[in-house]
Amino acid sequence: MKAAVIGYPIKHSLSPKIHTHWLKEHQVEGEYTAIEVSPNNLEKALGTMQAQGFKGCNVTIPHKVACVEFLDEISALAKDVGAVNTIIFQEDGKKIGTNTDVAGFINNIKQHQPDWKFKEKNICVLGAGGAARGVCVGLIREGVDKIFLTNRTKEKAEELQSLSPEKISIVDWENKGDYFANTDMLINTTSLGMVGHPALPCNITLLSKTALVTDIVYNPLKTVLLDEAEKHGLTTVTGLGMLLHQAAPAFEAWTGILPTVTNMLEQNIIKAMHNT
Ligand code: ATR
């Protein structure tokens, strides 16, 4: 079983560690590597992997949207999100694209907060980039009532609103706190709070005490947002589990085995993060 993650740059990807763990655990002979592919080499790289007998690959920045034109088919979910993160090279020669980031986000919350239900909840989503789109698609599929979407660049939020104008309302970035009292879950999908990026301007004390706070940033594992939320007594879920949970259905697509995301794997990946 040969598979890989392709991106540019790709050196720091944790995906090989995750998939190698599962290959060993399930005694599947094979390897999962990280391959650096520059944007102008994308089509050729996909063809080469297929010719070399790869079962498929994961796709990361900056290829998630660009790869679509080189695929034969993409799933309905990948169409909704407008991005592919998993490719399957079928035996009939077809290249099929799908998106497991949506399941990654939702299953991370379900694993860490099994009693938390999405149905009929009010959610505040910070950011309107590619990651926010996947998160909103997942939230809508899970049956949330309302999404308050806020982004520094309002036009991008308006574009994303077209996904579901009846569920998504746009909130001014500067006044996002006005909606916090009515929010059951706050999600940061921006790059703010990531190592090397500015902190997220956000007054979490305005949130209700029962609100759940999550961040898709996982480096650092405990972002300032999550730290402040914890200190305020709120329940939090870190972003690392999203990476693990998007990997599981990709592994299944290539091997037929759906692996379990265990705490031990999560701890191993945290250790690996500290060593890179
Ligand atoms: P991704 O695909 O990972 O979501 P992206 O499409 O570049 O990445 O989106 C990054 C998100 O972080 C956007 O919502 C971006 O806001 P803009 O649309 O206004 O650019 C947000 N972001 C990045 N830096 C920011 C900053 N300094 N202040 C506020 N938002 C920021």
Image (cartoon, rainbow, N blue to C red):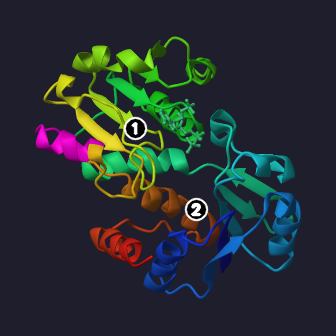
Q: For marks 1 and 2, give the one nearer the viewer.
A: 1
Residue at the image position 28 percent from the left and 46 percent from the top: 224
The answer for how far apart the CA atoms under marks 1 and 2 are is 24 Å
Residue at the image position 55 percent from the left and 84 percent from the top: 28
Q: Is mark 1 on a helix, strand or loop?
A: strand
Q: Quadrant of the N terminus?
A: bottom right
Q: Quadrant of the C terminus?
A: bottom left
Q: Is residue 80 magenta?
A: no
Residue 75 locus on image (x, y percent): 69, 44
Q: Is residue 228 magenta?
A: yes
Q: Is residue 78 left or right of residue 258?
A: right
- Which residue is labeled 2 in the image? 250
Give the extent of the magenta segment.
225-236
What amino acid type should be assigned to the residue bearing mark 1?
Asn
Q: How many labels does the image show?
A: 2
Q: Is residue 146 visible?
A: no
Q: Which mark is residue 188?
A: 1
Residue 129 locus on image (x, y percent): 57, 35
What amino acid type should be assigned to the residue bearing mark 2?
Ala
Residue 60 locus on image (x, y percent): 64, 57
